[in-house]
Image (spheres, grey):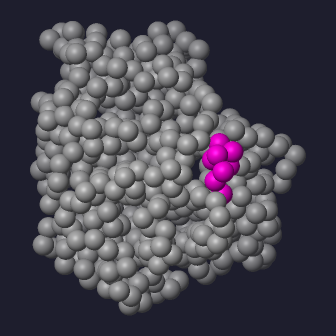
Amino acid sequence: MVRARLLVALSTALLTLGACSQGAPDAGGEPRATPSAEVAAHPPLKQPVKPRIDRPNILLVMTDDMRADDLQWMPRTQEFFATRGTNFRNMFAPTPLCCPNRASYLTGEYSHNHEVWWHDEPFGYGSFDDRHTLAGALQQAGYATGYVGKYLNRYGIAAPKADPGADPATYVPAGWDEWRGTPDATGLPSWDPREGSTYAYFDTTVNVNGTLEGHEGEYNSQVLVDETLEVMEEFQAGNRPWYLQLNSLAPHHGGPTELDDPAEFATPARPEWTKGKFDLEIPRGLGVPESGEPEDDVSDKAGLTRFRDPLDDADRAGILAVSRQRAETLLAFDHQLVRVLRNLKRSGQLDHTIVAFTSDNGFMQGEHRWRDGKVIGFEPSYRVPLLVAGPGVPEGVDDDIPVNTVDLSASVLDWAGARLDGTDGHSFVDAIGSDRGWDRAVGYEAYFPKLPNDRTVPGFEGGDASAVGIRTAGWFYVRYSNGQEELFDLRADPVQLTSVARDPAYADVKAELRKAWNSFHACAGSDCHIPLSKALRAGAAETTELTELMQTETARYYGR
């Protein structure tokens, strides 16, 4: 349900006001002073919806491993969308892992159709055919297209499937007028200044249209925003509408190793000025309640969770350090992203540009004994942010219609008037502000390398999936390739503490969810838009009630 929201609590407003009096930081340095009015140009009140326009510019910002509740660490980004856009509170990553979900966005297909299930061989970038993606469709519709930042895992290492003889580090995928992708490796000797990596926060190498450029000593977020601004200014000087995708590394882990990194945890590197910024605001890991143990009994869960040990003191200390460092990297990116938003305002193109902000997947931080990681279908991994601003998008509201990554891809194509054959997503452009409730199944699917798949379990006979699930407003049902099941009644159990899959009282609802499951697990194209039965649908008011119940109960349980 769409509703006006309280934009910022007093403490958050003070934090945001202070942050917005500062400009983008130099490499690792404190921010420079700049006025905030250039970004937050409207008062924090619900405004009449500006009409949709044909062929708007489109800026898509995608972070890496960012949970939906991580938005709190990006106050200036929050402020921009709170005054100008809509917060889609039910946005999901259908395969919550970097490589497959990025492939889903670029192709508009679920993983069971593009078949990029994992980030390592035999999957990863080498298994992805990028000759026919959103980029080419936008080009054919008359758009200038640009890409900056992380691509798919093993880009720069694996031979491109589209051109196996090409140099992996300098390869430029089809469809991009301006390419500024970051290779995971370059193959160059260590002394070469161009030898860097996607995952080196202070040594990022950028492939600029086939030529490698090194950035040793510069912080990743600043490098990527510098590249974005260069491409954006080139596009602004032209006479075509443009699509530009900025892919942040934050808050994904990456080097170099720092003195305060916890043992046995992967952490992101961050600039000095951010260190310690959230030590008071984050007293313990985001997924660790005051008791210290996220879940006393996991015997109801599938084996992937059931056999996990309780957290110990080292786990809790490590999760706390990771939570703080991730927040610090997002704050650094927040200070850089505002430079892009300021450019749109100064150039006069802000009112003609769709700006969308999302993540490729979420991240576990102790919940259900998952001390880190993603892929699993629990909410911190599966749910991601989606904020959208621009012509035709209401300002200062929440929208609780269910959407996912392939729907976002379909919506970008819809905004641009472009067409890409074979897509599985369904555009939500015309549904924005419609109060339609939750009337369709949202799919989840994943591959777990260590989960046996004997291909005899119904629904798993012909593919690589290890888990397939269905999310509705009130239920989450998942079936694994070893025959195990989980079912969560989100009305009674919004924190997903107790699976009722084996409870006979839930046999009827499980049967209804299995029907939707059967429709989803091998769907293609328009067949992936799966209407829910009357028993599973939720109207607009109930959808909002359940969305807010999950938010409030999760915050209460974890003492946030």
Instruction: List x then y, in percent, for residue 311.
Output: 28, 48
Q: Quadrant of the C terminus?
A: bottom left
514 or 293: nearer the viewer: 514
Instruction: List x then y, in percent, for residue 138.
Output: 63, 47
Using residue 544 as the reference point, say whether residue 445 is left or right of it: right
112 or 79: nearer the viewer: 79
Up the image or down, 503 lies above or below 281; here it is above
Q: Which residues are magenta?
A: 135-144
Rendered image quadrant of residue 499: top left
Instruction: List x then y, in percent, for residue 430.
Output: 38, 39
**The magenta stretch spans residue 64:** no
Tell me if residue 74 can be seen: no
Q: Quadrant of the N terminus?
A: top left
Tell me if residue 56 can be seen: yes
- Residue drawn where x is 22% and y is 71% of the image: 43
Up the image or down, 504 lies above or below 253; here it is above
- Residue drawn where x is 56% and y is 31% of the image: 423
- Residue drawn where x is 78% and y is 46% of the image: 159
